[in-house]
Image (cartoon, rainbow, N blue to C red):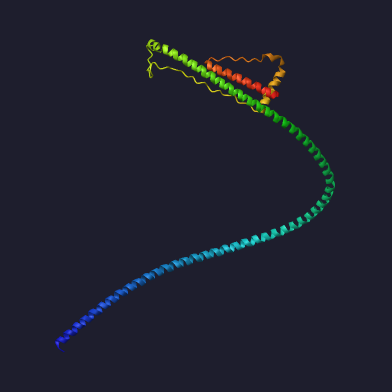
Protein backbone atom coordinates (compact mmCIF):
# COMPACT_ATOMS: atom_id res chain seq x y z
CA UNK A 1 0.00 0.00 0.00
CA UNK A 2 1.13 3.51 -0.59
CA UNK A 3 1.65 6.09 2.10
CA UNK A 4 -1.37 8.12 1.00
CA UNK A 5 -3.73 5.22 1.40
CA UNK A 6 -2.28 4.43 4.81
CA UNK A 7 -2.72 8.06 5.88
CA UNK A 8 -6.32 8.14 4.74
CA UNK A 9 -7.07 4.89 6.50
CA UNK A 10 -5.64 6.21 9.75
CA UNK A 11 -7.56 9.46 9.43
CA UNK A 12 -10.77 7.50 8.87
CA UNK A 13 -9.98 5.32 11.85
CA UNK A 14 -9.50 8.45 13.99
CA UNK A 15 -12.86 9.88 12.89
CA UNK A 16 -14.56 6.56 13.61
CA UNK A 17 -12.98 6.38 17.10
CA UNK A 18 -13.97 9.97 17.87
CA UNK A 19 -17.55 9.30 16.73
CA UNK A 20 -17.67 6.11 18.80
CA UNK A 21 -16.33 8.04 21.82
CA UNK A 22 -18.99 10.74 21.42
CA UNK A 23 -21.70 8.12 21.03
CA UNK A 24 -20.46 6.29 24.13
CA UNK A 25 -20.37 9.46 26.26
CA UNK A 26 -23.88 10.45 25.18
CA UNK A 27 -25.23 6.98 25.92
CA UNK A 28 -23.44 6.91 29.28
CA UNK A 29 -24.90 10.29 30.33
CA UNK A 30 -28.42 9.18 29.36
CA UNK A 31 -27.87 5.94 31.26
CA UNK A 32 -26.73 7.87 34.34
CA UNK A 33 -29.83 10.12 34.13
CA UNK A 34 -32.15 7.14 33.87
CA UNK A 35 -30.32 5.41 36.71
CA UNK A 36 -30.71 8.49 38.99
CA UNK A 37 -34.44 8.71 38.14
CA UNK A 38 -34.88 5.02 38.90
CA UNK A 39 -33.04 5.45 42.23
CA UNK A 40 -35.30 8.41 43.13
CA UNK A 41 -38.42 6.40 42.29
CA UNK A 42 -37.05 3.50 44.32
CA UNK A 43 -36.47 5.74 47.36
CA UNK A 44 -39.98 7.20 47.01
CA UNK A 45 -41.48 3.73 46.73
CA UNK A 46 -39.48 2.62 49.80
CA UNK A 47 -40.79 5.62 51.78
CA UNK A 48 -44.34 4.94 50.59
CA UNK A 49 -44.01 1.28 51.51
CA UNK A 50 -42.76 2.27 54.99
CA UNK A 51 -45.78 4.57 55.41
CA UNK A 52 -48.14 1.83 54.26
CA UNK A 53 -46.49 -0.60 56.66
CA UNK A 54 -46.94 1.87 59.54
CA UNK A 55 -50.59 2.42 58.58
CA UNK A 56 -51.08 -1.34 58.41
CA UNK A 57 -49.59 -1.71 61.90
CA UNK A 58 -51.91 1.00 63.23
CA UNK A 59 -54.90 -0.69 61.60
CA UNK A 60 -53.91 -4.04 63.08
CA UNK A 61 -53.59 -2.47 66.55
CA UNK A 62 -56.98 -0.79 66.15
CA UNK A 63 -58.58 -4.03 65.05
CA UNK A 64 -57.13 -5.78 68.09
CA UNK A 65 -58.48 -3.05 70.39
CA UNK A 66 -61.89 -3.14 68.71
CA UNK A 67 -62.02 -6.91 69.10
CA UNK A 68 -61.22 -6.56 72.80
CA UNK A 69 -63.89 -3.89 73.24
CA UNK A 70 -66.41 -5.98 71.34
CA UNK A 71 -65.69 -8.92 73.59
CA UNK A 72 -66.14 -6.73 76.70
CA UNK A 73 -69.37 -5.23 75.31
CA UNK A 74 -70.72 -8.69 74.51
CA UNK A 75 -69.97 -9.80 78.05
CA UNK A 76 -71.68 -6.71 79.48
CA UNK A 77 -74.65 -7.11 77.14
CA UNK A 78 -75.06 -10.70 78.18
CA UNK A 79 -75.12 -9.63 81.85
CA UNK A 80 -77.62 -6.84 81.09
CA UNK A 81 -79.82 -9.20 79.11
CA UNK A 82 -79.89 -11.63 81.99
CA UNK A 83 -80.92 -8.83 84.37
CA UNK A 84 -83.60 -7.62 81.93
CA UNK A 85 -85.01 -11.11 81.61
CA UNK A 86 -85.26 -11.38 85.38
CA UNK A 87 -86.93 -7.94 85.59
CA UNK A 88 -89.36 -8.91 82.83
CA UNK A 89 -90.36 -12.01 84.75
CA UNK A 90 -90.87 -9.96 87.92
CA UNK A 91 -92.98 -7.40 86.01
CA UNK A 92 -95.11 -10.15 84.52
CA UNK A 93 -95.79 -11.54 87.98
CA UNK A 94 -96.65 -8.02 89.25
CA UNK A 95 -98.91 -7.51 86.22
CA UNK A 96 -100.80 -10.68 87.02
CA UNK A 97 -101.26 -9.55 90.63
CA UNK A 98 -102.43 -6.08 89.48
CA UNK A 99 -104.91 -7.58 87.03
CA UNK A 100 -106.37 -9.71 89.82
CA UNK A 101 -106.64 -6.67 92.15
CA UNK A 102 -108.17 -4.62 89.28
CA UNK A 103 -110.88 -7.21 88.79
CA UNK A 104 -111.67 -7.07 92.49
CA UNK A 105 -111.77 -3.24 92.39
CA UNK A 106 -114.11 -3.29 89.38
CA UNK A 107 -116.48 -5.54 91.26
CA UNK A 108 -116.40 -3.20 94.27
CA UNK A 109 -116.92 -0.15 92.02
CA UNK A 110 -119.99 -1.70 90.44
CA UNK A 111 -121.47 -2.40 93.85
CA UNK A 112 -120.70 1.18 94.98
CA UNK A 113 -122.22 2.66 91.80
CA UNK A 114 -125.43 0.81 92.38
CA UNK A 115 -125.59 2.19 95.95
CA UNK A 116 -124.57 5.73 94.88
CA UNK A 117 -127.17 5.90 92.12
CA UNK A 118 -129.86 5.18 94.65
CA UNK A 119 -128.67 7.97 96.99
CA UNK A 120 -127.88 10.40 94.17
CA UNK A 121 -131.47 10.92 93.12
CA UNK A 122 -132.43 12.10 96.59
CA UNK A 123 -129.42 14.44 96.83
CA UNK A 124 -130.01 15.93 93.38
CA UNK A 125 -133.56 16.83 94.29
CA UNK A 126 -132.36 18.61 97.43
CA UNK A 127 -129.62 20.44 95.51
CA UNK A 128 -132.07 21.54 92.81
CA UNK A 129 -134.44 22.99 95.41
CA UNK A 130 -131.55 24.87 97.07
CA UNK A 131 -130.36 26.21 93.70
CA UNK A 132 -133.86 27.46 92.87
CA UNK A 133 -134.05 29.30 96.19
CA UNK A 134 -130.62 30.85 95.56
CA UNK A 135 -131.69 31.89 92.06
CA UNK A 136 -134.74 33.67 93.44
CA UNK A 137 -132.56 35.47 95.99
CA UNK A 138 -130.09 36.47 93.27
CA UNK A 139 -132.92 37.81 91.08
CA UNK A 140 -134.18 39.92 93.97
CA UNK A 141 -130.67 41.25 94.61
CA UNK A 142 -130.26 42.06 90.90
CA UNK A 143 -133.54 43.98 90.90
CA UNK A 144 -132.48 45.99 93.97
CA UNK A 145 -129.06 46.67 92.41
CA UNK A 146 -130.70 47.90 89.21
CA UNK A 147 -132.81 50.32 91.24
CA UNK A 148 -129.68 51.55 93.04
CA UNK A 149 -127.94 51.88 89.69
CA UNK A 150 -130.74 54.02 88.28
CA UNK A 151 -130.65 56.24 91.39
CA UNK A 152 -126.88 56.58 91.12
CA UNK A 153 -127.08 57.50 87.43
CA UNK A 154 -129.60 60.24 88.30
CA UNK A 155 -127.29 61.52 91.05
CA UNK A 156 -124.35 61.50 88.65
CA UNK A 157 -126.33 63.52 86.10
CA UNK A 158 -127.24 66.06 88.78
CA UNK A 159 -123.60 66.27 89.87
CA UNK A 160 -122.47 66.78 86.27
CA UNK A 161 -124.99 69.61 85.85
CA UNK A 162 -123.74 71.19 89.08
CA UNK A 163 -120.14 70.86 87.88
CA UNK A 164 -121.00 72.57 84.61
CA UNK A 165 -122.60 75.44 86.55
CA UNK A 166 -119.51 75.65 88.76
CA UNK A 167 -117.26 75.77 85.71
CA UNK A 168 -119.33 78.62 84.24
CA UNK A 169 -119.12 80.53 87.55
CA UNK A 170 -115.38 79.86 87.67
CA UNK A 171 -114.87 81.29 84.18
CA UNK A 172 -116.92 84.37 85.09
CA UNK A 173 -114.88 84.89 88.28
CA UNK A 174 -111.63 84.51 86.36
CA UNK A 175 -112.73 87.06 83.75
CA UNK A 176 -113.72 89.52 86.49
CA UNK A 177 -110.39 89.04 88.29
CA UNK A 178 -108.43 89.52 85.07
CA UNK A 179 -110.31 92.74 84.30
CA UNK A 180 -109.73 94.01 87.85
CA UNK A 181 -106.02 93.16 87.78
CA UNK A 182 -105.60 94.80 84.34
CA UNK A 183 -107.37 97.97 85.54
CA UNK A 184 -105.27 98.07 88.76
CA UNK A 185 -102.01 97.55 86.86
CA UNK A 186 -102.88 100.36 84.43
CA UNK A 187 -103.68 102.77 87.29
CA UNK A 188 -100.47 101.86 89.13
CA UNK A 189 -98.44 102.27 85.94
CA UNK A 190 -99.88 105.75 85.32
CA UNK A 191 -99.19 106.82 88.93
CA UNK A 192 -95.66 105.45 88.79
CA UNK A 193 -95.00 107.23 85.49
CA UNK A 194 -96.08 110.55 86.99
CA UNK A 195 -93.90 110.02 90.06
CA UNK A 196 -90.88 108.98 88.02
CA UNK A 197 -91.15 112.06 85.79
CA UNK A 198 -91.24 114.32 88.85
CA UNK A 199 -88.64 112.65 91.12
CA UNK A 200 -86.19 110.99 88.71
CA UNK A 201 -83.80 113.95 88.38
CA UNK A 202 -84.00 114.78 92.12
CA UNK A 203 -82.99 111.25 93.14
CA UNK A 204 -80.03 111.22 90.79
CA UNK A 205 -78.83 114.59 92.10
CA UNK A 206 -79.41 113.90 95.83
CA UNK A 207 -77.70 110.48 95.97
CA UNK A 208 -74.10 111.30 95.37
CA UNK A 209 -72.71 107.88 96.24
CA UNK A 210 -75.07 105.99 93.95
CA UNK A 211 -74.24 106.23 90.25
CA UNK A 212 -76.46 104.84 87.50
CA UNK A 213 -75.75 104.45 83.81
CA UNK A 214 -78.69 105.79 81.91
CA UNK A 215 -79.54 103.59 78.93
CA UNK A 216 -82.72 105.32 77.77
CA UNK A 217 -83.66 108.96 77.40
CA UNK A 218 -84.60 111.01 80.45
CA UNK A 219 -87.95 112.05 78.97
CA UNK A 220 -89.04 108.42 78.38
CA UNK A 221 -91.97 107.24 80.46
CA UNK A 222 -91.00 104.50 82.94
CA UNK A 223 -93.58 101.80 83.71
CA UNK A 224 -93.56 98.84 86.09
CA UNK A 225 -95.73 96.06 84.71
CA UNK A 226 -96.66 93.55 87.34
CA UNK A 227 -98.00 90.37 85.77
CA UNK A 228 -100.81 88.72 87.66
CA UNK A 229 -100.29 85.15 88.80
CA UNK A 230 -102.50 82.62 86.96
CA UNK A 231 -105.39 81.32 88.98
CA UNK A 232 -105.03 77.60 89.77
CA UNK A 233 -108.38 75.98 90.46
CA UNK A 234 -108.45 73.27 93.14
CA UNK A 235 -108.77 69.70 91.95
CA UNK A 236 -112.28 68.33 92.33
CA UNK A 237 -112.55 65.16 94.36
CA UNK A 238 -114.13 62.03 92.88
CA UNK A 239 -117.67 61.16 93.92
CA UNK A 240 -116.83 58.32 96.31
CA UNK A 241 -114.13 60.26 98.21
CA UNK A 242 -116.34 63.34 98.39
CA UNK A 243 -119.28 61.32 99.77
CA UNK A 244 -117.06 59.73 102.42
CA UNK A 245 -115.61 63.08 103.57
CA UNK A 246 -119.01 64.72 103.75
CA UNK A 247 -120.42 61.78 105.72
CA UNK A 248 -117.51 62.08 108.18
CA UNK A 249 -118.13 65.82 108.57
CA UNK A 250 -121.86 65.29 109.09
CA UNK A 251 -121.18 62.59 111.70
CA UNK A 252 -118.78 64.95 113.53
CA UNK A 253 -121.40 67.71 113.46
CA UNK A 254 -124.02 65.34 114.86
CA UNK A 255 -121.74 64.34 117.74
CA UNK A 256 -120.89 68.01 118.62
CA UNK A 257 -124.19 69.83 118.21
CA UNK A 258 -123.43 72.26 121.03
CA UNK A 259 -120.58 73.75 118.91
CA UNK A 260 -122.73 74.59 115.86
CA UNK A 261 -122.21 78.33 116.15
CA UNK A 262 -118.43 78.17 116.63
CA UNK A 263 -117.47 77.07 113.11
CA UNK A 264 -116.12 80.48 112.00
CA UNK A 265 -112.77 80.32 110.22
CA UNK A 266 -110.49 83.35 110.70
CA UNK A 267 -107.93 83.93 107.97
CA UNK A 268 -105.27 86.52 108.72
CA UNK A 269 -103.94 88.42 105.71
CA UNK A 270 -100.26 87.66 105.02
CA UNK A 271 -97.55 90.32 105.23
CA UNK A 272 -97.13 90.37 101.47
CA UNK A 273 -98.33 92.61 98.66
CA UNK A 274 -101.96 93.49 98.18
CA UNK A 275 -102.26 91.48 94.97
CA UNK A 276 -101.27 88.22 96.70
CA UNK A 277 -103.78 88.95 99.47
CA UNK A 278 -106.54 89.53 96.93
CA UNK A 279 -105.66 86.35 95.11
CA UNK A 280 -105.83 84.34 98.35
CA UNK A 281 -109.25 85.83 99.21
CA UNK A 282 -110.59 85.08 95.75
CA UNK A 283 -109.36 81.50 95.99
CA UNK A 284 -110.93 81.08 99.43
CA UNK A 285 -114.26 82.43 98.17
CA UNK A 286 -114.12 80.05 95.19
CA UNK A 287 -113.35 77.05 97.44
CA UNK A 288 -116.22 77.95 99.77
CA UNK A 289 -118.58 78.16 96.79
CA UNK A 290 -117.40 74.76 95.54
CA UNK A 291 -117.95 73.17 98.97
CA UNK A 292 -121.48 74.67 99.19
CA UNK A 293 -122.35 73.43 95.71
CA UNK A 294 -121.09 69.96 96.56
CA UNK A 295 -123.27 69.91 99.68
CA UNK A 296 -126.29 71.02 97.66
CA UNK A 297 -125.67 68.25 95.12
CA UNK A 298 -125.44 65.68 97.90
CA UNK A 299 -128.70 66.86 99.39
CA UNK A 300 -130.31 66.60 95.96
Please determine whether, in this image, residue 228 is positioned above or below residue 72. Answer: above
**In terms of image quadrants, where is residue 12?**
bottom left
The image position of residue 82, as x and y in percent, is: 67, 61
* Position in image of residue 171 (x %, y %): 58, 24
Residue sitting at 79 percent across and 38 percent down? 135
Which residue occupies the foreground of this view, 213 or 249? 213
Q: Is residue 77 above or below residue 166?
A: below
User: Which of 124 and 207 lies nearest the eye of the viewer?
Assistant: 207
Residue at the image position 76 percent from the left and 34 percent from the top? 143
Please identify the quadrant where the C terminus is shown: top right
Q: Quadrant of the N terminus?
A: bottom left
Asked where in the image residue 242 lies, by quadrant, the reply is top right
Taking depth in this image into account, of 86 and 283 the one nearest to the observer is 283
For this view, does 298 lie left or right of residue 179?
right
**How many numbered callouts?**
0
Q: Residue reaching furthest left?
A: 3
| Image spot of residue 244 (x, y percent) | 68, 25
Residue 26 drawn above or below residue 152: below
Question: Residue 240's image quarter?
Answer: top right
Q: Is residue 224 left or right of residue 214?
A: right
Taking 60 as reference, is 300 left or right?
right
- 32 vs 75: above or below: below
| Residue at the far bottom in the pictured view | 1
Residue 63 percent coordinates (x, y): 53, 65
Q: Nearer the viewer, residue 117 or 207?
A: 207
The residue lying at 34 percent from left, 73 percent from top is 35
From the viewer's perspective, is 287 left or right of 193? right
Q: Residue at x 71, y 60 (%)?
A: 89
Amino acid sequence: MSSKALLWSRIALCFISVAFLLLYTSQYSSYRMQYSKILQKYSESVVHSDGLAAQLRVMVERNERIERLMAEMRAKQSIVMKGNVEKYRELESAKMACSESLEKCNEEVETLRSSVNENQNEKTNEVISELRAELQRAQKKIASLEKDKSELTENVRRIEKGLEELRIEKEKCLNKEENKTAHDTKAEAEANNKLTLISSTKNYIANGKVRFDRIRAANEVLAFERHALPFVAPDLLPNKVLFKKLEQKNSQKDTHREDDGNGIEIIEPPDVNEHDYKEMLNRFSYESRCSKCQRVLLLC
